[in-house]
């Protein structure tokens, strides 16, 4: 008892004066010595609502989808069919690996509209998730997008856990089932209306009936949608304008299709897995893909393989020696990018790296080399897929 009284005295002293912290800790020690008579310490996280545990996941999903949408809108190559990064090329690549090719064929009827629609949908889902506004609807939209990507792009990824879309698909589940929970505009709108979303009011409180409350919640959330929708539309438009202005101010990078010539077809040469040099003495059989001079020395030029309609690269790794290789990653069908610095192809989806000279896999998860495409240079200076 004497020790407990001493602890109380020390606590009172700790309320004022210098050294309060050390006095308080001395008091705590004295209380512990007295047999733990004081109330147990409560950690700050004990006061959190259980749904707050989903905040990191919600922030990640929301920010990722906003970023994905804005990135597509900002990238002028995304809608340019001649670019290896374009939605058109991605769709052609997806045809090889899709679980539901008819979905891809459908998108190929209007690839630009499909690409813009996907970008705007990602942006809307991301904003709704970040702010927790109509969070269940946003989560259902995110789930639908992830399912679409899974069925078309990453379905053939093996092992399956290398594919991100299947993980995103399931990551949306808690928000579809439970909504956004704490720290969300949904919760704010519900609390302002006097009750949780759609829940009946407590009897005897005089609060409005549940239907009236639900109407209030819907109206206030609709007003928020208008405000956030306007902000999202302005952001999307500005992103597209700034992205294109930035791209036109940048010098074209090595390996990218140069100028307008790339909008038709571009050149390639050499033989399938190796290379062939020099100018042929006649026009070889096959389909012309453009002038050999369009392929930069030490670089690559993207073209569409006339036999498969798939993206491919023409290469001139050493002067006068042309070759060509498929640009469709053998792992799950993404379009690879040429890296001029080390003469490799790098897959943006899961990081596979291929040797540009022979297609060999330098880094997985891909295990199959990039196939070569037989090409030859004709006496007319054009390259032909033979
Ligand atoms: S698609 Fe997976 S590494 Fe290329």
Image (cartoon, rainbow, N blue to C red):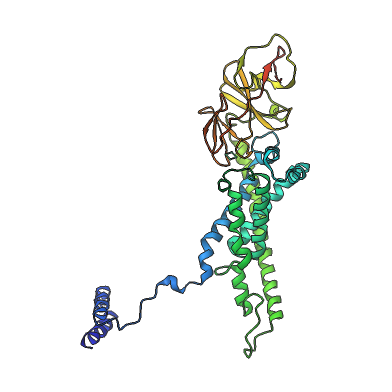
What's the residue at 65%, 44% (across, down)? 153
Q: Is residue 258 visible?
A: no
In which of the image's four quarters is ligand 1 placed?
A: top right
Image quadrant where one finds the C terminus: top right
- Number of marks in the rendered image: 0
Query: Quick check: 300 left or right of 47?
Result: right
Residue that lies at the very extreme toward the left in this rendered image: 2
Above or below, comparing residue 332 to residue 195 in the picture: above
Residue that lies at the very extreme toward the bottom in this rendered image: 204
Residue 381 found in image quarter: top right
From the viewer's side, name the closer residue of 179 and 293.
179
From the viewer's side, name the closer residue of 155 and 19.
155
Locate residue 37, reporting x and y percent.
Answer: 30, 84
Image quadrant where one finds the N terminus: bottom left
Residue 356 found in image quarter: top right
From the viewer's side, name the closer residue of 326 and 69.
326
Q: Is residue 168 visible?
A: yes
Residue that lies at the very extreme toward the top in this rendered image: 281
Above or below, comparing residue 283 to residue 48 in the picture: above
Locate residue 19, reporting x and y percent.
Answer: 24, 74
Locate residue 30, reporting x and y percent.
Answer: 24, 79
What's the residue at 68%, 17% (across, down)? 376
What's the residue at 58%, 35% (across, down)? 250
Above or below, comparing residue 274 to residue 164 in the picture: above
Query: Quick check: 314 left or right of 286?
Result: left
Locate residue 238, reporting x and y percent.
Answer: 64, 50
């Amino acid at each position: 008892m004497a020790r407990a009284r001493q602890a109380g005295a020390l606590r009172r002293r700790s309320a004022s004066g210098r050294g309060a912290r050390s006095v308080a800790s001395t008091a705590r020690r004295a209380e512990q010595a007295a047999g733990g008579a004081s109330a147990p310490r409560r950690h700050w996280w004990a006061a959190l609502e259980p749904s707050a545990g989903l905040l990191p996941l919600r922030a990640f999903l929301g920010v990722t989808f906003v970023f994905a949408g804005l990135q597509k809108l900002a990238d002028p190559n995304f809608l340019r069919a001649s670019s290896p990064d374009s939605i058109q090329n991605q769709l052609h690549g997806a045809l090889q690996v899709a679980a539901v090719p008819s979905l891809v064929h459908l998108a190929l009827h209007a690839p630009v509209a499909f690409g813009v629609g996907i970008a705007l949908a990602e942006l809307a889902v991301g904003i709704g998730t970040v702010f927790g506004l109509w969070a269940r609807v946003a989560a259902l939209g995110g789930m639908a997008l992830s399912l679409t990507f899974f069925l078309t792009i990453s379905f053939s990824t093996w092992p399956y856990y290398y594919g991100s879309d299947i993980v995103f698909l399931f990551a949306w589940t808690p928000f579809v089932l439970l909504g956004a929970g704490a720290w969300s505009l949904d919760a704010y709108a519900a609390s302002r209306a006097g009750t949780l979303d759609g829940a009946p009011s407590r009897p005897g409180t005089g609060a409005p009936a549940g239907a009236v409350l639900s109407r209030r919640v819907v109206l206030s959330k609709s007003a928020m949608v208008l405000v956030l929708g306007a902000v999202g539309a302005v952001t999307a438009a500005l992103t597209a304008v700034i992205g294109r202005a930035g791209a036109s101010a940048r010098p074209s990078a090595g390996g990218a299709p140069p100028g307008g010539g790339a909008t038709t077809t571009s050149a390639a040469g050499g033989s399938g897995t190796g290379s062939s040099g020099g100018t042929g003495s006649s026009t070889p059989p096959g389909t012309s893909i453009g002038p050999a001079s369009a392929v930069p020395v030490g670089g690559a030029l993207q073209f569409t393989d006339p036999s498969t309609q798939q993206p491919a690269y023409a290469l001139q790794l050493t002067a006068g020696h042309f070759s060509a290789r498929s640009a469709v990653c053998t792992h799950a069908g993404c379009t690879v990018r040429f890296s001029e610095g080390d003469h490799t192809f790098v897959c943006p989806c899961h990081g596979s790296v291929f040797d540009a000279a022979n297609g060999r896999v330098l880094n997985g998860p891909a295990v199959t080399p990039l196939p070569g495409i037989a090409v030859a240079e004709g006496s007319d200076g054009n390259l032909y897929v033979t």
